[in-house]
Amino acid sequence: MAGGKEIRTKIKSVQNTQKITSAMEMVAASKMRKAQDRMRASRPFGEKIRKIAAHMSKASPEYRHPFLVTRPIKRVGLIVVTSDKGLCGGLNTNVLRMALTRMKGWDSSQIEVDITAIGGKGFSFMQRMRANIVSEVVQLGDTPHLDNLIGPVKVMLDAYKEGRLDALWLAYTRFVNTMKQEPVMEQLLPLAGDASDAQEGQWDYIYEPDAKSVVDHLMVRYIEAIIYQAVAENMASEQSSRMVAMKAASDNAGNVIQELQLIYNKTRQAAITKELSEIVAGAAAV
């Protein structure tokens, strides 16, 4: 059994760790509220433009944007959204596991995969997996900025327009509530109307000034909105998951301190009893 001094050192160490996790819990809670407000504020626009774009895919305009054209899949692009920092439970592990499973499925079908990594954890993971990373963006901070996101994503969009990619997928963590976040993988391109209630022949439009200008602008706004929303959802999920993880760590540290304190008391009591026994034995010998 460890001595009293060693146990006191361990208790002090765990108490210091508990102070750190408690502070991180409070910081995450503060950032979580801001991230959730930002995420909820952007949801209506993202949902609306998603519906409009889905309706557009069902329409029959005189101009068909490349994002609406379906072709045989030989090479796909995958945008993986993760956090830059750890200590947020299984948030990154879950979405990366899902992405890796899909990548293995594509590989078994002899479909090549290009990766765009948004977030340091995903970038490091894809590097270790020796994936074909064509673009990345890390150190996003606590607030997503579209100017930082659209550059790496444009690499994928240009490849799709030029025919080097046949499909584009997006993997991120969707915020459900503070206690629940779910990994999601959805197809960005080619755009399909399956996500809406649109039916064939119901969505025809009159374009002004012309179909090409309107559709090109809409497709760009669609991609920007979806990517921004995914990053906002992932950041809200990150802070919520970190707050829960740090609270669990603080609670566990408290339990460890109680156990160590009990062991310390038993060790101290045993040492006192031993000293008394030695004194009594010495007195009896005299």
Image: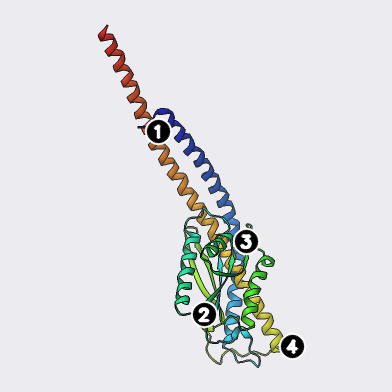
Name the residue type under label 1.
Answer: Gln
Q: Provide the secondary structure element on which disc 1 rests.
A: helix
Q: Are marks 1 and 4 in contact (CB under 8 Å)?
A: no
Quadrant housing the N terminus? top left
First in sequence, mark 3 or 1: give its number. Answer: 3
> Which residue extends farthest right?
209
Mark carried by residue 261:
1
Mark nearer the viewer, 3 or 2: 3
First in sequence, mark 2 or 4: give its number. Answer: 2
Mark nearer the viewer, 3 or 1: 3
| Residue 214, quarter of picture | bottom right
Crowding near the residue tagged with mark 4, few <14, some 14–19, many ≥20 C-alpha atoms within 10 Å: few
Mark carried by residue 195:
2
Residue 254 seen in the current view: yes
Q: Nearer the viewer, residue 138 or 224?
A: 138
Residue wearing tag 3: 138
First in sequence, mark 1 or 2: give its number. Answer: 2
Q: Nearer the viewer, residue 190 or 180?
A: 190
Name the residue type under label 4.
Answer: Pro
Q: Residue at coordinates 50% horizontally, 61% vertically from top-left?
A: 92
| Residue 54, quarter of picture | bottom right
